[in-house]
Amino acid sequence: MTKIQILWLRRDLRLSDQPALMAAVQAGPVIPVYVLDDETPKHRKMGGASRWWLHHSLKALDARLREKGSRLILRSGNAANIVADIAHKAGASAVHCIRHYEPWWRNAEKELTVLLGNDVELVRHDGNYLKRPGSITTGSGDPYKIYTPFWKALSAQMPPHEPAPVPQKIPAPDEWPVSHNLDDWGLLPTKPNWAGVMEQEWTPGEVGARGRVDAFVDKATQYDEGRNLPSRELVSRLSPHLHFGEVSPAYVWHRMTGRGRDVTTYLKELVWRDYAQNVILQYPEYGGKNARDKFDDFPWRDFRSSEVRYDFDRWTKGQTGYPIVDAGMRELWATGWMHNRVRMIAASFLIKHLLIDWRKGEEWFWDTLCDADYASNSVNWQWVSGTGIDSNMFVRIMAPLSQSEKFDAGDYIRKWVPELADLDDPYIHDPEEFGRKPNGYPAKIVGHKQGRERALAAYKEIKG
């Protein structure tokens, strides 16, 4: 007689190419469980934009499960305790999950193993990345720290496995555990509803993810150019879907390469996700600790100062007086996402022009990004700040005004900064310089030369 199998879901909210689900289905009746756990991550619980996405993704997943004769059990609290309790009360023989590499989830998996005891096995599967983090090593068996050799080593082992299909049927238990009501979790904003644009921009869930893949397939060959051009729709916008595991990276890889075209630049972005996970596997505190120790003494402006907090507030609201930065920050607030090139420009501006600790920016992105991924967010911020194990040099300071003109951001600015919508190129990139700054648009929070010189002077203090 087959025994109950628990499917513990976290950031793997799909039915296709879902190895934990496939293994559970083959072993017996399945109880899919998602636990909203704000206790285990402690200060890393999901931000507002991610919670909005999660609500819709769980709703979509439950609908998909019901089509297959199953359903989603929702609980809230400490995930290890709750999953163990459900498993024991159901008489389960195993809990299946996909491995996660955030330090709190690794600890939770260890804790769950203890709580399950000898009667219930915790079976962990790979499936959220192209290769299991930690498995790509140098000739001496050490993990890679630098991206380029990591990319070469991982790409040599590609293509990934062929994606598995959705199970035709998911066997159900005779009796279901009690489930919470999703609407009672309060994941959606109340008044004011700041998610209005997000509702128009996104379709969370596996169907929406596949739709994004379909929409990008024919554009993937233009990604090398498109990742730098915010005014054109030439990026995949798959990052939230990949983060929540609504589509597997193996599926994305095969779809993008299926026509024999050169999509190398996009594949490198896909591999960057794997690289970031390998970084946090080596450095679990990467989200809050400089990888380069000398930056521990860096003279950031004091965030306790009302002036610094005011500057930070203007940055978050897109009121810096730098149109490309303001457009990006307003896009982020409205949609929960920001274009690749503009993310770097906006992050660099906070760190170097405003001389505000990168961790403050990382925290803001964590709360406002739908794709707020601990590994990717941490690695990206440390790359821009120059504090990471593989990072840009701090002294390479992006000039937002020339970047805006170089990458033809005029239409992007017109969309997100309506005060400037009537300005033509080249005035829109720097209206203050041309004497075209309209009423209602702020003056520059700091001059480019002034900000650059201040940043270089600060760096000199730790250079020795």
Image (cartoon, rainbow, N blue to C red):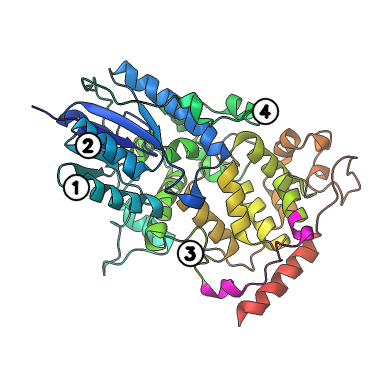
Residue at image coords 72%, 33%:
415
- The span picked out in magenta is 293-309
Say above or below: 341 vs 93: below
What kind of residue is marked 2? His
Find residue 363 and report its horizontal and vertical position in percent.
58, 51
Left or right: residue 147 versus residue 125 is right
Q: Is residue 260 visible?
A: no
Disc 1 crowd rating (10 Å Cα; few below 14, some 14-19, many 20+) is few
- CB atoms at circles 1 and 3 under 8 Å apart? no
Q: Which residue is mark 1?
A: 117
Reading the chain from its start, which is encountered first: label 3 or label 4?
Answer: 4
Q: Is residue 376 left or right of residue 228?
A: left
Which residue bears the numbered disc 2?
Answer: 88
Residue 305 is one of the magenta-drawn residues: yes
* Residue placed most toward the observer, 45 or 77: 77
Q: Nearer the viewer, residue 380 or 115?
A: 115
Please tell me the numbered disc located at residue 390: 3
Image depth: mark 3 or mark 2 in front: 2
Q: CA distance from mark 2 to mark 4?
A: 41 Å
